[in-house]
């Protein structure tokens, strides 16, 4: 707040300096009062850089003399970012006498001052934005000979309305937005030089800033699957008649009623100033006025941004998201892309789904509101689909939700709305891990009189179906197993099996099982210990048997290798 006071005091000091130069007949508003009602005190989005504040109305300014110029200053507690204009001009159109010449009222923004008097039609002045203030310059001319008052101010009947002022609400230290108005006038020769009205200015509250957007990922329901594996990928279930469980569901929440705005109409980003001045003024055609002042360039955009997505993946998102509160409020993908009616399996979603392919690992899914409503939530199911063996091991895919367009705004903005670039950390989704099975053979030996046989099998040709809540991760794939041995002697050299094939009854090319004795594997005898087999595919299984080669004990003992949970994670629901 101290920063705001400094700025206001600076403007006031400037006014006092001019006031000291006045002499002769004075020109002093005596009854101007701030008229900013609580019902016109909007909520501004904390994420927004072009948030529209309430109109500020100054009424009943009683004046005297014949001013030659007038400047009204509006000082805000935040940087002003009203939409930029270039070459647009506003001109006084006094009634009933039209001006002999057009006097342009120029500015660099569509912040507008409306000057209303009893004798003339409303006059519209474009504002010039500089930091936290916007100024409106009014050349004062008498269009009718003998008229005692000018067409910019009139005795006892001048009302100033400052409208379409937008501010950068992002990063504001104080949630309350204030605006102070200050008027400077210059008098005609003989009537004084300069006089400033109400040196401290008159102001009030014009907005209150609140966070307006949040998102969340499932907290209790795990992602399906918890991790992606290279060999399995993530494919759409074949022959489905209902939408499969999404890989994740992003829940978007509107924290403030009306924060998700349309491009035009009720509940839009547009300001309160009329868009068509010619109609408002009853002028069929005029070169003096510009349409589009106060309007938005687009609706609120809400972007679901994914990063670190494999290049081979396709992301499917629903075209339309209905409000969770069933109030008729919905979001639709920007640009109205054609929904995908296939592949079969992604059915049961409102309006179908739309396919997105990553660019440099990113996917941006942009939704816009189709109707306004109260604060509500939207659940966006996402499907990340890619074939097996088409991606590499990588860290997590991430998701974030924020308003767009996002850019740093300094001075008048070119796009309405524009939002601050989000600095919030993205949330992690699935990682892509190597297909791996670790097998523990807890006791192997080829000490004198004994031998151990070891077998490993590739069982990725899985016809066991899907266990509810634990989808199978089996995808037929060939691979090898590397066996390391640990025991009572120097560690033997690791043994790498030949390629173990995924069984195919139609084209058996590689055997799915490898079996050998310990002595052949390590090339020496007298070893006792354990072995660990690391297989670069899922669904590996192993068996070992220990036999008496001398016949002294006349027996054998066999056991199944222990499947050790690792990155492939039995507990994570990826199947065995």
Image (spheres, rainbow, N blue to C red):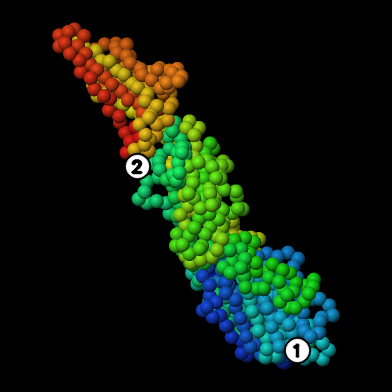
Instruction: Please name the residue shown 30% across and 31% down the image.
Output: 564
Q: Is residue 315 left or right of residue 470?
A: right
Indicate the position of residue 458 as horizontal and vertical percent values: 37, 24
Secondary structure, mark 2, is loop
Q: Quadrant of residue 532?
A: top left
* Circle on res. 149: 1
Instruction: Please name the residue shown 51% across and 62% down the image.
Output: 329
Residue most extreme to the left: 552
Instruction: Please name the residue shown 33% across and 16% down the image.
Output: 515
Neighbourhood count class around disc 2 (C-alpha, 10 Å): few under 14, some 14–19, many 20 upward = few
- Along the line of sight, the residue nearer the viewer: 508 or 95: 508
> How far separated are the C-alphas under marks 2 and 1?
83 Å
In the rendered image, the quadrant that contains the C terminus is: top left
Q: Is residue 542 above or below residue 91?
A: above
Residue 253 shows in this picture: no
Instruction: Please name the residue shown 61% across and 90% down the image.
Output: 31
- Along the line of sight, the residue nearer the viewer: 200 or 355: 355
Indicate the position of residue 19 as horizontal and vertical percent values: 66, 84
Q: Quadrant of residue 297?
A: bottom right
Indicate the position of residue 527 as horizontal and vertical percent values: 25, 15
- Along the line of sight, the residue nearer the viewer: 495 or 193: 495
Q: Is residue 573 above or below residue 336?
A: above
The residue carrying mark 2 is: 469
Indicate the position of residue 172 as horizontal and vertical percent values: 51, 65
Q: Is residue 75 left or right of residue 117?
A: left
- Along the line of sight, the residue nearer the viewer: 450 or 35: 450
Q: Is residue 240 above or below residue 17?
A: above
Neighbourhood count class around disc 1 (C-alpha, 10 Å): few under 14, some 14–19, many 20 upward = many
Residue 570 shows in this picture: yes
* First in residue order: circle 2 vs circle 1: 1
Residue most extreme to the top: 550
């Amino acid at each position: 707040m101290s920063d705001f006071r400094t700025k206001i005091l600076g403007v006031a000091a400037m006014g006092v300096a001019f006031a000291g130069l006045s002499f002769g007949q004075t020109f002093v508003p005596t009854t101007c009062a701030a008229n900013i009602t609580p019902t016109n005190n909007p909520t501004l989005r904390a994420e927004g850089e072009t948030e529209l504040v309430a109109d500020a109305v100054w009424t009943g300014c009683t004046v005297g003399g014949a001013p030659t110029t007038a400047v009204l200053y509006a000082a805000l507690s935040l940087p002003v970012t009203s939409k930029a204009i270039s070459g647009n001009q506003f001109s006084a159109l006094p009634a009933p006498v039209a001006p002999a010449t057009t006097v342009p009222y120029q500015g660099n923004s569509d912040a507008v001052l409306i000057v209303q008097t009893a004798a003339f039609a409303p006059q519209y002045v474009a504002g010039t934005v500089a930091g936290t203030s916007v100024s409106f310059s009014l050349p004062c001319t008498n269009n009718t000979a003998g008229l005692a008052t000018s067409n910019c101010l009139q005795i006892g009947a001048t009302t100033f309305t400052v409208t379409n002022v937008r501010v950068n609400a992002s990063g504001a230290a104080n949630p309350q937005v204030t605006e102070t108005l200050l008027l400077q006038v210059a008098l005609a020769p003989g009537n004084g030089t300069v006089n400033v009205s109400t040196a401290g200015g008159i102001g009030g509250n014009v907005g209150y800033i609140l966070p307006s957007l949040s998102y969340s990922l499932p907290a209790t329901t795990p992602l399906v699957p918890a991790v992606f594996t290279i060999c399995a990928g993530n494919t759409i279930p074949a022959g489905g008649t209902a939408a499969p469980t999404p890989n994740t569901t992003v829940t978007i929440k509107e924290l403030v009623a009306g924060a998700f705005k349309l491009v035009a109409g009720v509940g839009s980003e547009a300001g309160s100033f009329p868009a068509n001045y010619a109609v408002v003024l009853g002028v069929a055609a005029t070169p003096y006025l510009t349409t589009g002042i106060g309007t938005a360039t687009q609706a609120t955009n809400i972007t679901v941004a994914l990063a670190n997505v494999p290049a081979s993946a396709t992301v499917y998102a629903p075209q339309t998201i209905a409000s969770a509160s069933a109030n008729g409020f919905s979001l639709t993908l920007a640009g109205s892309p054609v929904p995908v009616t296939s592949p079969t399996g992604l059915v049961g979603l409102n309006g179908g789904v739309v396919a997105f392919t990553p660019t440099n690992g990113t996917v941006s899914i942009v939704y816009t509101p189709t109707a306004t409503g109260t604060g509500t939530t939207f659940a966006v199911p996402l499907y990340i689909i890619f074939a097996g063996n088409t991606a590499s091991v990588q860290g997590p895919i991430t998701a974030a939700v924020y308003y767009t367009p996002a850019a740093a705004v300094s001075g008048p903005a070119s796009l309405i709305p524009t939002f601050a670039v989000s600095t919030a950390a993205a949330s992690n989704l699935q990682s892509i891990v190597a297909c791996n099975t670790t097998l523990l053979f807890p006791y192997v030996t080829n000490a004198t009189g004994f031998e151990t046989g070891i077998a490993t099998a590739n069982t990725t040709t899985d016809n066991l179906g899907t266990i509810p809540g634990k989808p199978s991760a089996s995808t037929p794939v060939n691979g090898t197993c590397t066996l390391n041995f640990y025991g009572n002697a120097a560690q033997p050299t690791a043994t790498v099996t030949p390629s173990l094939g995924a069984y195919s009854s139609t084209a058996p090319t590689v055997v799915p099982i490898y079996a050998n004795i310990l002595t052949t594997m390590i090339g020496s005898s007298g070893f006792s210990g354990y072995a660990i087999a690391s297989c670069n595919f899922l669904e590996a299984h192993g068996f070992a048997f220990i036999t008496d080669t001398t016949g002294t004990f006349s027996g054998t003992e066999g056991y199944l290798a222990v499947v050790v949970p690792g990155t492939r994670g039995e507990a994570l629901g990826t199947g065995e």
